[in-house]
Image (cartoon, rainbow, N blue to C red):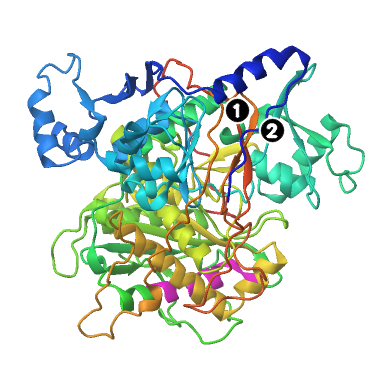
Amino acid sequence: MRAASPTLRFGPRRTVLVLGALLAWALPALPAPQAERTVKISEDFSALLAGGTIRVSARPLEGEAPAEFAARISRDEAAAAELKKLWPADPAAPVPEISFRDLSSAAQLAAVRALFPADLRSNEFWVHIATSDEPMETIAVWFTGNAANAGEIAKLNGLAGDIAIRGTRLQIPARLLSPAFRDAPAIEDAEPVTLEFGEDAKGKYAVYKLRPREALYSSVVVRFTGRLHAEDVILLALRIAERSGIDDVHGIPVGFPVKIPVEFLTEEYLPRDDPRAVARLKERAETSQFAPPAVAESLRGVRIILDAGHGGRDTGTIHGGVWESTYVYDVACRLRKFLLTKTRADVVMITKDPGLGFESPDRDRLRDGKSRLLLTEPPYRLDDPVVGVNLRWYLANSWLRRPGRDKKPIPPEKTVFISIHADSLHPSVRGAMAYVPGERFLREKYGKRGTVYANYREWKEEPSVLFNRKERVAAEGVSMVLAGRILSAIRDANLPVHPFSPVRTHVIRGGREWVPAVLRYNRVPGRVLLEIANLSNEKDRALTVTRSFRQSMAEAVGRGVIDYFQTRPAESTVVTVASRPDLPAADPAFLRPKPAPIAPATHTPAPALVPTGTPVVVQGPWPPLYGPSKPSAVTPAGAARVPAAAEPTTVVIREIPFLPAVPVEKSSPTKSPKPEATRTR
């Protein structure tokens, strides 16, 4: 399929500029000096681009030993050893610059994200926008690690020369990408959107024009502001309606320009020069430095801590007679069984129903109960939701210190924590989503006092937690990857996934932002709170009460964890998972097949200059809005998935060339709101 060239919208005053751009496009491109710039994403990491060469200036994060830092940021042991030789003895001395080829794949991703903020990872490609005239071999090295791939990338993009001129949009197939680029989370929108920005007497705003079958609640408030809870969505929808001059929120015509106050936009929809967008882009680049752990074949030496949310007197949300605590416990038990059967991991459930044990009844509707225990020492009967949620993270931290079944220590990077929940959101919202601990929300020290906690082994081991900067940055980075793998596996199982930013670093509710306590004070580096469904949505609720959905969800989450610990080489996507000696061989159905080769496509290079706000067509396929075409049906294991649409999709280059330079301030601890007894996370 031939990708369309950028559409240029212009009036009489821009005719000369457009003719000049078209003339420059028609003439042979002459190499131009590459822009030189430095982007400082934190006090500890800066990326430099000069003469087509990327270099990084970095130092260990607070709490990170120089040897640990060298091993993390370097390509291999030889590069790490060389870096240690060059490291200055004086901490105040300038640090040496590290060449791009000597960086780890994750550090390379961090540098590229800082220098090229308009780049994105689509479903099948990395989409790169050239910010200057860039040699194809240089691009191949940046994104694939091999200059020999330059010819194939040029051919796939319809380029005859060896230079990608400024503004050229390149699609680099996922099969060629270096591991960190290949594994970066893909965009989730089925069709990226265009926002225009303006300002009036009431302040700055973004304009979105409604499309057919779109509603103010789901297509504007939920999508662009991150609000999900019913009261928040309704109140903000009314405010946006008033600002936009809408009298009837249920009768808005197609194409109507809806004004969204800029202060309510989430970071990804802000103008590139907005301070919040700049800060988030830098945060995302910095957390990209931390890659998933080394390959653990069959998950040998891995510990997986499973937490079924709520329980006991805390039922969680209840809708249509469906108790959250009852059904997420069933999913957790099914996930435990799947992992014990398919892997050699050490699987730990931290709650237990004394009557059921860890068994999953073979029926759709489940009996509700309030007798669940938290498996602390001694066990805690879940009577108080606030105490229960705090003892959960104390227990998770204790498991991080305990040896495995073979009495050998399990490294923190080989441990993951998954807390399973079902949400209560606006009824228009549906599908799975995940929360991870955002670095800027993690308090540096926290602990509980009182006899209610002092009686437990887990509290006695470590009454308070203290996170250094390295731990905070690493937690967001690796947890984002873990959450992405889990949601990708859920989507691959043809189950519903929330279409708009399904992985989030914090909760937005009632005008506050926070990280759930079970993640915030948890020491396990890779930790995720997974919402399997929205029980306020009738279709999600109908799915949740079926055993087939719960089994499919459990297996999908298990596959996502396996993927997280089994990062595959670039040329292969098949990894054999050995079974336990005393159990049947691994089921081939849960191993991901090697993807079909991407068909070559002819592309027309972009003009030498792509103006800000220009719509650009990016080739699909894009992921569907929801998993199943019929939400009430669950695809059996091994069945073919409904293919995603392959139509080209328009995105907007909102700003090129680069991030503006802004001073970086050290983040201060953010006070966490008190957990609410009725809705504890």
Residue type highlighted by circle 1? Arg
Whether residue 195 sits left or right of residue 255 in the image: it is: left
462 up-or-down from 270: above or below:
below
How far across and down, in percent of the image, does residue 160 sit? 44, 36
Residue 93 or residue 651, whichever sits in front: 651
Relative horizontal placement of residue 674, taking residue 231 as reference (left or right): left
State the residue in front, 449 or 256: 256
Residue 509 belongs to magenta span: no
Q: Relative to 225, is 544 above or below?
A: below
For label 2, the residue is 195
Q: Which mark is residue 149?
A: none
Q: Position of residue 592 (x, y in %)?
A: 39, 68
Q: Is residue 495 above or below residue 152?
A: below
Name the residue located 25 percent from the left edge and 69 percent from the top edge. Answer: 298
Per the image, label 1 sits on a secondary structure element best described as: loop
x 49%, y 58%: residue: 530
Q: Position of residue 331 (x, y in %)?
A: 49, 72
Q: Tag 2's secondary structure?
A: loop
Q: Amino acid at mark 2?
A: Leu
| Segment colored magenta | 322-336
Q: Is residue 196 left or right of residue 87?
A: right
Q: Chief secondary structure of the magenta span?
A: helix
Sequence-first tag of 2 and 1: 2
CA separation in Å, label 2 and label 1: 9 Å
Which residue does the numbered mark 1 point to in the structure image?
A: 654
The quadrant where residue 83 appears: top left
- Crowding at dot 2, Cα within 10 Å, few <14 / some 14-19 / many 20+, comes out as many
Decide if residue 401 is in sight here: yes
> What residue appears at the point 31 percent right and 69 percent down from the top-left corner?
347
